[in-house]
């Protein structure tokens, strides 16, 4: 009586029990589960008619629209492998990923067709499908998506596959900040169990209205593309992250749940409309991607009434492996103390497997909140490996554990707290200084809206902390003022020795700070490059 673990089964369940319920809201368009299921099925048939078979790879470069959701189900239910593409990367990286992934077909949004047109002759694709967008001009010789799924025989059987839970579901490429992007192989089983974690630990239920602020291409929307369907809840699509639009949708669509990087949280609390908005709902918001400052979590809760939930993971782990579980005993703590707890990465989720912080010899660090080690994990949600890269796979998964490269401590209650990426830890005069600890102080400064701390060369100490900050509109503060503020709020040796004020910080498409770009400015020709 074995049944494979696959998110595709949740589509079947949703169609059985909620056929007339609205599953997708995308601007002015709405689709019931029955309508959505029919569109996904027509896509599967059209793909088969175009020569796509089980195991074939189909690349998709779309924003958070109903088309993207249709692709997740229409491609994967036939046993093909979806390759979600980041539409903000360079044409060169697009060329590399499409060819490296062995994609036979590309489905692309018209807005992002220009770089594809630029590299078209160098791609090994057999076919390109374009989703037309009002106001955009498509220069590609390609088939229109709506025409593609409409012009199929009405009686054509849907090519549902007999899924092996260990076969690939999606091939997700990392950002490639220090090397070529790596293709992370994620299976049906891993996605299913990660989405189960998403459902259970984020409290997803049938009446939830979920706003897709997080790019669906990023680790399959952290599992949200599956979990919302599994419960019969409603997907609200968002083509672009515009804070004022998000705040309007909170009220207009009664949004109850969303996910986003700390950068998105920061954008929301600093949106002028946030000062005056009065919400009749208090959405739950999961944040991850980079360690959020406690001050930012506190402000999101106080200003917007968001119930902030902190999760942690990587693309290689589907992505969730830790979450900051809230206990009733925390209710009596002050708002600041609660925010500090929520800023921790937390404990293992129910379905992912084992995660711990270890020393270099592989033994676990003391649960004292002081001893630093690396987060490693193993279990149900870890990737099947890097596509066509056994050497990097072996390096990342040595000893039967996936090594995250994140440095952390474990508190006496078992909660893990990241102190830095291995390459971001500042070693000054033999002392370890956490860049995230300094950033946490900077985010409490009344004039600072964003902050990044890196190590820079120093003749005496080897390297010292440097802060790069973005000020709030209309604010004026000096380098000396910021350094003094830090020295007043932390150990003097940890405070930044210099501060640079900039208009913006470099980020990935998912809102992660790209510290390597900042380091390159100060380490060229020196020892520390990454």
Image (cartoon, rainbow, N blue to C red):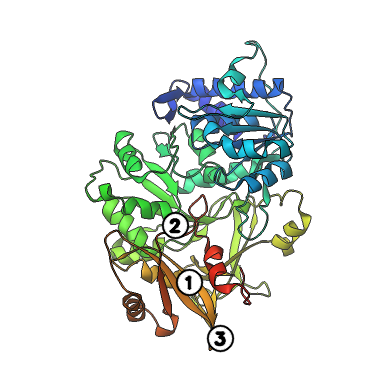
Q: Is residue 297 above or below residue 24?
A: below
Q: Is residue 9 visible?
A: no
Element under label 2? loop
Q: In which quarter of the image is the N terminus?
A: top right
User: Residue 268's spot in the image, x, y percent?
Assistant: 34, 50
Q: In this view, does 338 lie above or below 252?
A: below
Name the residue that disc number 3 marks.
Answer: 430
Name the quadrant containing residue 41: top right
Left or right: 278 with respect to 117?
A: left
Residue at 73% across / 64% down in the picture? 399
- Disc 1 vs disc 2: which is toward the camera? 1
N-terminal label among 3 and 1: 3
Mark 1 crowd level (few <14, some 14–19, many ≥20, 10 Å Cα): many
Name the residue that disc number 2 marks.
Answer: 325
Element under label 1? helix
Alpha carbon separation for disc pair 2 and 3: 35 Å
Alpha carbon separation for disc pair 3 and 1: 15 Å
């Amino acid at each position: 009586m074995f049944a494979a673990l696959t998110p595709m089964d949740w589509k079947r369940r949703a169609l059985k029990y909620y056929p007339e319920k609205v599953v997708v809201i995308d601007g002015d368009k709405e689709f019931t589960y029955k309508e959505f299921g029919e569109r996904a099925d027509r896509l599967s048939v059209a793909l088969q008619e175009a020569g796509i078979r089980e195991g074939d790879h189909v690349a998709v470069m779309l924003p958070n629209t109903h088309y993207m959701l249709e692709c997740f189900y229409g491609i994967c239910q036939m046993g093909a492998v979806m390759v979600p593409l980041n539409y903000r990367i360079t044409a060169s990286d697009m060329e590399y990923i499409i060819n490296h992934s062995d994609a036979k077909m590309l489905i692309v949004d018209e807005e992002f067709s220009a770089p594809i047109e630029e590299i078209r002759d160098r791609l090994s694709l057999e076919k390109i499908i374009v989703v037309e967008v009002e106001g955009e001009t498509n220069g590609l010789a390609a088939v229109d998506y709506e025409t593609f799924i409409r012009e199929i025989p009405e009686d054509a059987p849907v090519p549902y596959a007999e899924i092996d839970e260990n076969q690939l579901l999606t091939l997700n490429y990392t950002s490639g900040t220090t090397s070529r992007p790596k293709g992370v192989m994620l299976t049906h089983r891993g996605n299913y169990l990660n989405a189960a974690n998403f459902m259970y630990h984020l409290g997803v239920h049938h009446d939830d209205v979920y706003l897709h602020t997080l790019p669906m291409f990023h680790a399959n929307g952290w599992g949200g593309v599956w979990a919302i369907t599994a419960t019969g809840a409603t997907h609200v699509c968002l083509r672009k992250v515009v804070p004022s639009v998000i705040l309007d949708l909170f009220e207009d669509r009664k949004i109850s749940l969303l996910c986003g990087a700390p950068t998105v949280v920061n954008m929301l609390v600093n949106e002028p409309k946030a000062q005056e908005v009065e919400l009749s709902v208090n959405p739950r918001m999961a944040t991850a991607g980079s360690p959020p400052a406690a001050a930012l979590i506190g402000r999101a809760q106080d200003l917007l009434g968001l119930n902030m939930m902190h999760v942690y993971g990587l693309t290689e782990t589907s992505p969730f492996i830790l979450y900051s579980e809230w206990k009733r005993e925390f209710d009596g703590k002050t708002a600041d103390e609660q925010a500090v707890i929520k800023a921790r990465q937390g404990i293992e989720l129910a379905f992912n497997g084992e995660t711990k912080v270890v020393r270099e010899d592989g033994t676990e660090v003391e649960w004292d909140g002081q001893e630093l080690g690396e987060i490693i994990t193993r279990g149900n949600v870890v990737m099947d490996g890097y596509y066509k890269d056994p050497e990097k796979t072996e390096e990342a998964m040595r000893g039967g554990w996936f090594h995250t490269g994140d440095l952390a401590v474990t508190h006496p209650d078992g909660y893990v707290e990241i102190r830095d990426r291995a390459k971001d830890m500042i070693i000054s005069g033999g002392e370890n200084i956490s860049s995230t600890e300094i950033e946490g102080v900077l985010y409490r400064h009344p004039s600072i809206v964003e902050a990044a701390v890196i190590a820079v060369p120093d003749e005496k100490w080897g390297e010292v902390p440097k802060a790069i900050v973005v000020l709030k509109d209309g604010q004026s503060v000096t380098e000396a003022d910021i350094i003094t503020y830090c020295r007043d709020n932390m150990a003097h040796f940890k405070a930044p020795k210099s501060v640079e004020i900039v208009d913006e910080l470099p980020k990935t498409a998912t809102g992660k700070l790209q510290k390597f770009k900042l380091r390159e400015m100060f380490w060229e020709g020196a020892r520390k490059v990454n």
